[in-house]
Each structure stands twice: as structure tokens, then as C-alpha cells.
Amino acid sequence: MSLAETAASVNGAFDSIPIIDIGSGSTPEERAVLAQQIRDACMKVGFFYVTNHGIPQETIDKVFSALKAYFSLPLETKMKKLYHKEVANFKGYAPVLDSNIDPANRGDLHEGFEIGCEELVPGENDEKRANDGAMAGENVWPQEPAEFREACLNYYHAAIGVGKVLFRLFALALDLPETYFDDKARSNSAAIMRTLHYPPQTGPEDCPTVPILDSNDIQCFTILWQEPGIQALQVLNSEKQWITAPPIPGTLVINIGDQLARWTNDVFRSTVHRAINRSGVRRYSIPLFFGTDYHVRVEPMPSCVSAERPPKYEPITAGDYVQKRLREMYH
């Protein structure tokens, strides 16, 4: 049965998020088993946890400490020369309510700091992302805390390693050669990381005046670290029920984004989700949105198209798609 045919019979009424151990893929046979687990998760849920992801706990602890220190600074300090609407392509600082994924709300109830690809030690011919086409533009960095840049970039590159492992498993899950995405994600340019701070939230969950961030992500997939012990993430199933995705120690949350859903003609599910912080305390998270290089042409894969499931999307380059979606978010 083809992927397109299988997708037609998938039941999306999930009541939990699957957990997959990606550290158990040392042989082709083991990777084939992982790919099947990932295929099932992507077609039925669009979300899964990964264990044994390989990011050192020390790297996580340092970036967590740095982002807490940064977000505790006065607003004017965070805004000075760092406001993302005054620098290239949305990099830098975004205050509370500045973005708005859902036009029915008055803004997203979080503040964030966004970065793209950058080496910790710049090379001799560092082009500052000048060749990223529609998304060209270098990172900007705060002067304090002093360790912010190093902590963020160390985590960023560790998460990139997880993304490269996942891209190969996604290829196998789509009945493609394991290396299918290798030449489409060479520069890491399309990996965008956002450190986020959510203040405590009050008011009814479905009140449109309370920002709750109902969303789909725009890249191929997201690698999410959640602060331990604070429940916020919820995922919408096909029965319109919100299923919790609590932080589980030692895991990252992976979810399919709109770009990979588009590429697979919606065989892989980009699932609506939201973050509601009812904990009464501040909450932090770090999503890394992993995509292909910006020049790559994205159009429905032949294996995901059939007479009964014709192509749903027109071709578009990855960079043009990401820029279009970001402009909509920060209108």
C-alpha cells in the first residue's frame, strides 16, 4: 500500500504522544524499525517525544540559565538595537504580544529571542548569512548576559545534530533513500532557534482576549525543549480534543511543521497545538525549527500523490515560504 493510500485510512483520534528512542539506530535494521515508529507517529499524531537524543545536560543547563538571565532584564535593555523588526529577517528580540499566529487573538503571550545559523568561532570568509536568499541576514546579540551567545550557539549546534539524525529517519519513513535530505540541508541556514519566556497566564483557556498560541509550525519539523515540571503544551486531535504533552525528563518533543506536511501532501500531519501557562510561575522553552536550505524547491512528493490524493500545493522555494509565513506572523 502506498503512503497516499495509507494516509487515507489513518485515525487521528490519538489520546497520548508516543515516545521513540532514537539512540537505538546503529544498524540498518534498527533504523528501519525506528522509521516505522516515526511514520506511524507522523501520520497519526504529528508529534512524538525522543529519548537518547544526545544533547548533553550541561549544554541544556547553560542555555536555560542564560535565557532566564536575559529575559529578566528591563524591556528597554532587551529592545535596544535588538528589536527584530529593525534587524534582518526577524532575528533578535520580540516582546510579549508582538507576534500573532492567530488573528483572532490580540497577540502571543510570550517574549522571545530568535537566532539563525552561526559558527561559535567565525571562519575567515564568514559571509554572515549573505547567501540565504529571501532569508539573508546575520544574528544580533545582547551585550548581557555575557554568556548568552555561547550558550545559545552550543545548544543550537547540538540540536542541529539531532535534526540531521531525524531527517534521515524521516527519509526512511517516507520510503526514500536514507540520504535523501542530506543535500537539501547542507548549510543549516534554515534552522531557526527561538528562546521563549511565557509569563503566568490567567483567564479562560478559550477566551479570544487571552493569547494562547494555537498554531502550526512553519518549517519541516520542530525540536522542542520544555522546562521540566511545568505543563503547558497541548496538541489537538481529530476529535477536537486537547491532549497534553507534559515535559518528560530526558526527552525532546518533535513535531511536524507545515513545510514537511506540504512536501508530503499532508501524509505527515502538521498538528495544531498551543501553550497555556497555568502554573502561576514563569515558563521557558526552546524550539528549534529545522528546515531545508532556502533555495530548495518544495512540492508534493510523488509517493504522497495519487489519483485519489492529487497535489494540494503549488511548488515554492523553502526561503520564500518561510519569509511569507513570518511576515504573516509579525504583520
Image (cartoon, rainbow, N blue to C red):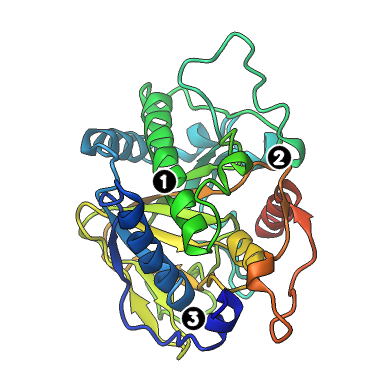
Q: Which residue is mark 2?
A: 135
**CA distance separating discs 1 and 3:** 40 Å
Q: N-terminal of the two: label 1 or label 2?
A: 2
Q: Local crowd at mark 1 within 10 Å, few (<14), some, or many (≥20)?
A: some
Q: Nearer the viewer, mark 2 or mark 3?
A: 2
User: Is 192 displayed left or right of 90 in the figure?
Assistant: left
**Residue type for callout 1:** Val
Looking at the image, can residue 185 be seen?
A: yes
Vertical relation: 304 (above or below) 289: below
Q: Nearer the viewer, mark 1 or mark 2?
A: 1
The percent coordinates of residue 214 (x first, y second) are: 52, 71
Q: Are marks 2 and 3 in contact (CB under 8 Å)?
A: no
Residue at 63% across / 71% down in the picture? 304
Q: N-terminal of the two: label 1 or label 3?
A: 1
Vertical relation: 162 (above or below) 143: below
Specify the quadrant that holds the N terminus.
bottom right
| Disc on res. 71 | none
Q: N-terminal of the two: label 2 or label 3?
A: 2
| Disc on res. 207 | 3
The percent coordinates of residue 317 (x first, y second) are: 75, 50
| Camera-nearest residue between 312 and 289 | 312
| Camera-nearest residue between 177 and 330 | 177
User: Is 299 displayed left or right of 78 in the figure?
Assistant: right
Q: Nearer the viewer, mark 1 or mark 3?
A: 1
**Residue type for callout 3:** Cys
The percent coordinates of residue 293 (x first, y second) are: 65, 41
**CA distance separating discs 1 and 2:** 24 Å
**Residue type for callout 2:** Met
Please identify the quarter of the rendering in which residue 126 is found: top right
**CA distance separating discs 2 and 3:** 35 Å
Please identify the quarter of the rendering in which residue 301 is found: bottom right
Q: Which residue is mark 1?
A: 165
